[in-house]
Each structure stands twice: as structure tokens, then as C-alpha cells.
């Protein structure tokens, strides 16, 4: 059995925020989610999260995600947090097997690295394995000391380290696999004798190493991967690293970016091949775009947007919770919200889908082949029929559905008696 325990009870004082650190969004998704996703993908069971500061906010944000919550109150350090989490996990699943313990503030860790850690742990039959990294600037991390045989003998926090220790560049990443029984035994024997009067998880590691147990260290090559978030600056830096990684993945999948430095994408954005993203495009999480599209410049696509193939979305267009089917065009200055737009639709410049009546959001349907004239306002809920036309400046009022093939004009929009649009 492999259970996981994510440590997420800390306040994150250096964020200077009322929001718990782990809820700060990193590319549209809470920091904690980046770690939660990975333990789920590894098949960890149960998946325990240790919460404390802002616990109600955290648990409600992750409601329905199959997590087991452990409350750490008060917060007496990472060792204490791990123990609270492990005890909760043991209640659920017993103490056979291993536990993967991770700091909640490491969003850039890659799956392959975690897999490597677990493989090494199993292959070596280790009691405990942990990730380490050679950092060019180790400031702020726990430093690792080794003996002449290169065995780990100590981990010293910045605040407890003397000059010689601070000069060491190998650091503790904050990701560990323990045999559950070993963790419980060792934690029972560790104290809080350090500068911060906290129970350090690192002291449990040191106790294992000094007690002659099998301790494996697995190096992480890329420094970027282990970046932690303690401050807003680090939040911005990590977001930037992750954004660059996502853009590379999209380009590797056949998407053209004219100027990637100006394109914002969030986690879970999917884009088909031969789609071109022009400069200054802002795509939030949970957006899917088909192939052969042209998006931008200056386009804002918000969560729940689904775009088909060969669609054109142009300048100063915002789309939210809407689908736009293949070969349609929304080329200039439009807002499309809570809508279903069919195939081969032309949405003219300046069209507004008025989805909000001040109380609730309402849906608009525009069927295939419709032509929405420039400056049309579609007051939801309303449906525009197949191949129907709205004249420039028409205001189609709520519930006044436009029949298939008809033409409506004016304010409020009325159907022209004589005009019915022929099939193409
Ligand atoms: C910790 C490690 C350090 C390592 C670094 C890597 C210890 C003592 N130090 O330091 O060696 O280099 O991570 O990022 O473990 N937390 C709780 N309850 C607590 C305290 C912390 O849940 O009582 C959680 C935090 O929310 C956070 C994680 O544990 O997600 C790490 O805590 P943090 O204070 O960031 O530890 P560092 O000082 O960074
Ligand atoms: Ca930290």
C-alpha cells in the first residue's frame, strides 16, 4: 500500500495574505491542486491532506475530490504535521506499506521524478527515501550533510545552520517516502530542540540515518523543478516557469505561437494541431480549442470555453462557458457568454451576448449558419434559428426566439415579413 500525506497546514506568513498559501492560484489552479493531482495520478490511497490555517476554505475548495483531511491544530512543525497526517491515514488503512509525504508548496515537481523516487525506494528495500537537489543558491532550504562514505548524516535548517553548513549546496526538497511503521516509531522519539521550537520532519530523517536504517537519497537534476512558493515573488516565478512548460508542450503538439512571450495559458488548456495563437492571448484553465483555428490577437478565453475546428476568434473578443462549433467566426470586439454557437456562424463585430439579468446567468443558442449582424445584442435566454439573420444593431429581447431562416431587425428586433433567407 502507498498512502500519501500532503502538508498544507502552514500559514504561509511570507505571502502576506488572508488566503491560505495553498489556495493561491498557480496558472488558474490552487497551489495545492498541483500536488493533489500528482498523488492521485500515482494511485496513492488514501490521500491525506493536513490542514490548519484556513482549513474550511481549503476543504470546501477540494470538496468531492476523494481526499482525507487531517487537522493539525496548533501547527507545531513539519514533523508534527506529517505525524498528524500519517495517524489519520493509519486510521483509514492500517500501517502496512509506505507513505509518500510531500510539502504542499512544490507545484513544479514532475511525475517522472516521483516515480523515480518510489522505484528506488522499492528496489533498495529502503526504510526511507527522499529527494535532494544541488542548488546554485541554497538559501532558505534545509542543507544536507554527508559523511566520508557519502551517507546522509544530517539535515540542518537555514535558521539552525552555522556558516559551514550554509555553504553546502545540497538541499532537502521536501518529498519523502517512509515505511509507515518506521515513521511512527521514529517520530515518537524526536523532539523539538531547534531555533523554531518545532517538530521537524527532517529530524525524523536524521534519526533514521543515524539509527542505521536504510536511507536512500534520489537527486533531482533540474533546480527549477523543486522551486517552492513562500512569497508572492516566488509565486510569480513558479507560474512563469510552468507557463513556459505548458507553451512548449502545446508547440510540441503542433500549435503555432507567433509570440509565446505574450501568451498566457493555464493548466488544462488543450489546443489542436495547426491552430495559430497570435500575440496577447489570455487563455484560462478548462479551455479546449480544436485544430486549424486562429485565435487572437488580444483574445480572452475563460473557463468552460469549447472551440471547434477551423474557427476564427479575433481582436478584443471574450468568450466564457460557451461552445463555438467548427468554421464559425467571432472576429472582432464581441462578448460571448453562456452560449452555444453552431457551425458556420458569423458573429459580427461588436455583438454582445447579454447573459446576465442581474440575478442569474441565462443561455443563448445560435444555430448553425446564422448571421449575427454587427452590434447585435442577444438578450438571454434566447435562440437564433438556423440560417437566421439579425440586422446591424438589432436588440433581440429575451425569449423572442428568432425562427430558422428568418431576418430580424431593429430595437426591439422584429421579423421582416418579406425576407426569409434561402438555403445556401
Ligand atoms: C521545509 C524543510 C526543509 C526543505 C524545505 C523545502 C523542514 C523542517 N524543513 O522547510 O528542509 O528544504 O521544506 O521546501 O521540514 N506545514 C504544516 N504544518 C506545520 C508546518 C508546515 O502543515 O506545522 C506545511 C506547510 O504548509 C508547507 C510544508 O509543510 O506546505 C513545508 O513547510 P514550510 O514552512 O514551507 O517549510 P520550509 O521552511 O520551507
Ligand atoms: Ca516552504
Image (tube, rainbow, N blue to C red):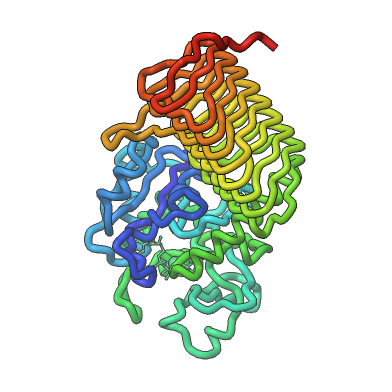
Residue at left 73%, top 42%?
A: 276
Q: Position of residue 126 (x, y in %)?
A: 55, 53
Q: How many marks?
A: 0
| Quadrant of the image occupied by residue 21 | bottom left
Residue at left 43%, top 29%?
A: 395
The answer to whether residue 259 is left or right of residue 105 is: right
Residue situated in front as seen by the camera: 343 or 194: 343
| Quadrant of the image occupied by residue 256 | top right
Name above or below for residue 135 compared with residue 224.
Answer: below
Q: Hey, which residue is sitting farthest left in the picture?
A: 73
Q: Position of residue 290 (x, y in %)?
A: 66, 31
> Is residue 42 visible in this depiction of the protein?
no
Name above or below for residue 32 compared with residue 90.
Answer: below
The answer to whether residue 360 is left or right of residue 333 is: left
Residue situated in front as seen by the camera: 404 or 163: 404
Residue at left 41%, top 52%?
A: 6
Residue at left 47%, top 53%?
A: 178
Q: Position of residue 19 (x, y in %)?
A: 32, 59
Residue situated in front as seen by the camera: 41 or 86: 41
| Quadrant of the image occupied by residue 260 | bottom right
> Is residue 166 visible in this depiction of the protein?
yes
Q: Hey, which residue is sitting farthest front in the picture?
A: 418
Name above or below for residue 168 compared with residue 85.
Answer: below
Q: Position of residue 376 (x, y in %)?
A: 49, 32
Amino acid at each position: 500500500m502507498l498512502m500519501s500525506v500532503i502538508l498544507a497546514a502552514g500559514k504561509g506568513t511570507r505571502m502576506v495574505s488572508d488566503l491560505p498559501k495553498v489556495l493561491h492560484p498557480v496558472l488558474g489552479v490552487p497551489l495545492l491542486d498541483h500536488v493533489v493531482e500528482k498523488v492521485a495520478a500515482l494511485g496513492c490511497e488514501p490521500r491525506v491532506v493536513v490542514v490548519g490555517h484556513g482549513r474550511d476554505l481549503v476543504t470546501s475548495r477540494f470538496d468531492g475530490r476523494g481526499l482525507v483531511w487531517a487537522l493539525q491544530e496548533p501547527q507545531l512543525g513539519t514533523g508534527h504535521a506529517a505525524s498528524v497526517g500519517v495517524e489519520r491515514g493509519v486510521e483509514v488503512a492500517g500501517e502496512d506499506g509506505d507513505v509518500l509525504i510531500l510539502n504542499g508548496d512544490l507545484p513544479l515537481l514532475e511525475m517522472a521524478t516521483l516515480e523515480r523516487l518510489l522505484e528506488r525506494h522499492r528496489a533498495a528495500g529502503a526504510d526511507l527515501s527522499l529527494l535532494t537537489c544541488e542548488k546554485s543558491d541554497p538559501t532558505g532550504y534545509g542543507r544536507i550533510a554527508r559523511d566520508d562514505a557519502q551517507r546522509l548524516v544530517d539535515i540542518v535548517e537555514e535558521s539552525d545552520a552555522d556558516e559551514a553548513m550554509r555553504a553546502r549546496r545540497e538541499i532537502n526538497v521536501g518529498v519523502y517516502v517512509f515505511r509507515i511503521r518506521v515513521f511512527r516509531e521514529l517520530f515518537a522519539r524526536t523532539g523539538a530542540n531547534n531555533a523554531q521550537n518545532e517538530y521537524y520532519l527532517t529530524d525524523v530523517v536524521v534519526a533514521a540515518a543515524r539509527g542505521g536504517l536504510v536511507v536512500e537519497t534520489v537527486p533531482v537534476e533540474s533546480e527549477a523543478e523543486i522551486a517552492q512558493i513562500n512569497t508572492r515573488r516566488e509565486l510569480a516565478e513558479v507560474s512563469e516557469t510552468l507557463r513556459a512548460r505548458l507553451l512548449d508542450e502545446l508547440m510540441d503538439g503542433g500549435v503555432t505561437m507567433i509570440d509565446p512571450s505574450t501568451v498566457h495559458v493555464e493548466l488544462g488548456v488543450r489546443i489542436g494541431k495547426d491552430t495559430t495563437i497570435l500575440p496577447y492571448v489570455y487563455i484560462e484553465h478548462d479551455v479546449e480549442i480544436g485544430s486549424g483555428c486562429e485565435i487572437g490577437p488580444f483574445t480572452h478565453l475563460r473557463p468552460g470555453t469549447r472551440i471547434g475546428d477551423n474557427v476564427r476568434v479575433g481582436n478584443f473578443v471574450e468568450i466564457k462557458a460557451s461552445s463555438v462549433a467548427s468554421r464559425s467566426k467571432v472576429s472582432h470586439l464581441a462578448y460571448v457568454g453562456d452560449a452555444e454557437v453552431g457551425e458556420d456562424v458569423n458573429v459580427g463585430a461588436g455583438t454582445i451576448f447579454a447573459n446576465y439579468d442581474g440575478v442569474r446567468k441565462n443561455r443563448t443558442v445560435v444555430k448553425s449558419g446564422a448571421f449575427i449582424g454587427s452590434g447585435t445584442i442577444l438578450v438571454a435566454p434566447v435562440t437564433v434559428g438556423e440560417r437566421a439573420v439579425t440586422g446591424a444593431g438589432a436588440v433581440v429581447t429575451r425569449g423572442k426566439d428568432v425562427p430558422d431562416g428568418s431576418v430580424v431587425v431593429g430595437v426591439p428586433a422584429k421579423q421582416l415579413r418579406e425576407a426569409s433567407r434561402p438555403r445556401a
